[in-house]
Amino acid sequence: MSDLQTGFLCLMTRPTEPLFYPKYNGEVFMDLPPEYLPERYQRIAGSIKTHHGSTAKHHISIKPVELPDFGYTARVPRHGEFNLFNPAQRQVAGRLVGDLLSQPDPQAMLSVAAYARDRLNPTLFQYALAVALVHRKDTGNVPVPSFLEMFPTRFVDPALFPKLVEEGFVVQQGERVAIEVPPSFSASEADPEQRLAYFREDIGVNLHHWHWHLVYPQEGPLEVVDKDRRGELFYYMHRQTVARYNVERFCNRLPAVKPLKNLREPIPEAYFPKLLNSALNRTYPGRHANMVLSHVNRPDDDAVATILELESSLGRIKEAIQSGFAMAADGTRVPLDPKKGIDILGNIMENSILSVNVPYYGNYHSLGHVLIGFIHDPDNLYLEGHGVMGDFTTAMRDPTFYRFHGHVDDVFDMHKQKLSPYKAHELSFPGVSISDATVQITSGKAARNRLLTFWQRTQVDLGTGLDFGPQGNVLATFTHIQHAPFAYQIMVQNETAEQKKGTVRIFLAPIYDANGEQLLLSQQRRYMLEMDKFVVKLHPGDNRIIRRSDQSSVTIPYERTFRRVDASNMPGTESFRFCNCGWPDHMLLPKGHPDGQPFDLFIMISDYKDDAVSTGFNENENCNDSHSYCGLRDQLYPDRRAMGFPFDRQPVAQDHLMKDFVGRFPNMSRTVAEVMFTNTIISRT
């Protein structure tokens, strides 16, 4: 690994330790110009180099360069909170990303970042650096560690860390044992919502949410923010997240979440996260049951908003949907047509810089998070920080996240319901038919159309996030849901005399709600879980398609969600991966039920001529394998159809059930598949 890559990794290791403090088992010393040291250490620069540099085997010299004026970053205090839902702080982050990207080469960016690191808010700095590294073409080979490695206290029970530190300091590397993370620590089983804690508090799910917003920042240089179908991806990724959560609720015999459409009603769900906010070394505040939103008036936090302000923004967004056009800042009408409308609405709702009219449509989504995040102390009377809803890394832990985003998705669906149902020629693929489709566990002699889930115990290395802690690997063991690997088998007939190309679209949908009532297709479409999407060549005659679950276009494998724990921490000897945007593979299947939970397995093959975009897409290349929720790096989204097609629109009146819809098109298939949960724990091998 080059000095440049190692230098950037040192910037992202143990983010509150001074940069000059030796990294990677004391083997790497960042040799900084004296003026780059924080003011406290500049007078003793010589002794620092003698003391810390003399024992390190490898020195990385930072050369002084012309520095930007970082005065604007004072808006985010060094030892305060950083909140990307906060418009003012988000602008600071966007400007910092711009300053890093504007450096002429990676070496200059490394120097600027080395100066800034120990002067700026650690979370702000790490976010901006990661965004810059991901988006610069000349730093594409620099691995970006996950936020779990940098700020582990935001993901696991803080009671774990004294045990980790003790194990790391007292026990030699080869004799250390992993410390167990309690599987359920935020509430007792008496709270019905705790049945879903395995989903909401899953480390991989929360890392996915953080990393998605890293790839799709709201603020920054236009070339970073303005990605293909960015607003539509915001809509679709969150729609799928809410759908997956609701399906998990059905599996646990709980109803779908009630969308939080009335911000003035009490919120019955309580939540006490018991996590440390690493910026403040305090726990995130909890929220009691039946608290009521009113306003936020915290000027020092750049958080000032009222419910009336949000209601006005929402009213204008709904007005745009009803009228079929949005009003741009210059007064022109921007049509919300079937192709671009959802993308425009996504940017308006999220309030990215791509919104057609920020002053008019406001900041509904982010301010909703802010209001809920400060519900416990809206006037800063008790000097409490924001709750988990005010932080991208933790928001998905809160039951209210899914209620709020369920409401946001209802607003998006108002637009989708105005669109005409798909016509037969948009859904059919003449000459292509599916004669049989099954799914089966790939190990042993498993029954067809029966899938298995269970608990799995997995180790993760938290050593690089233990600032001023022990060196080397410090392992924690946590328990999460997992599924047995499976594969689809699809038998397809190409009845023409020429080879055809098609897109295979696979969805899984609950047949019944929590009360055992069968779902109509008009209801079921909101719970369609995208499982996979891929392109196939169909030769004339019979075709047999086999597709493994670990090839899914939705997920990333375990190794890309969590670092390997059996390799050295020294840069260059570990397989770091930077393309970490994607749903975690272990959460691909819903949990199911011990008695078996029936699902509709929907498979469709659409005509690739209607799907293709002009891109050199290859799903087998790195970072292209989880494009359904994350798109592609520096490329167009690899599917011309609307995200969620064919279920993004309402069905025609005669399609009451899934079988009615599928029965009209030979290029579609419906199979009832059962997901069975086994309450056993298996260790990852």
Image (spheres, rainbow, N blue to C red):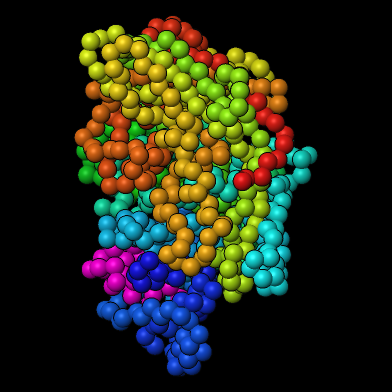
Find residue 159 and report its image quarter. Answer: bottom right
Magenta-colored segment: predominant secondary structure: helix
- The magenta segment is 91-118
467 relative position to 311: left or right: right
Find residue 655 and report its image quarter. Answer: top left
Question: Which percent across, then down, holds residue 208?
Answer: 49, 46
Q: What residue is drawn where x is 47% and y is 30%?
A: 548
Q: What residue is drawn where x is 39% and y is 71%?
A: 7
Q: Is residue 573 above or below residue 646?
A: below
Q: Is residue 307 magenta?
A: no
How many dots with numbers?
Answer: 0
Q: What residue is drawn where x is 31% and y is 61%?
A: 139
Q: Which residue occupies the foreground of this view, 83 or 149?
A: 149
Question: Which percent across, then down, holds residue 613?
Answer: 24, 32
In this orientation, does residue 486 appear?
Answer: yes
219 relative position to 396: left or right: left
Q: Which residue occupies the foreground of this view, 72 or 7?
A: 7
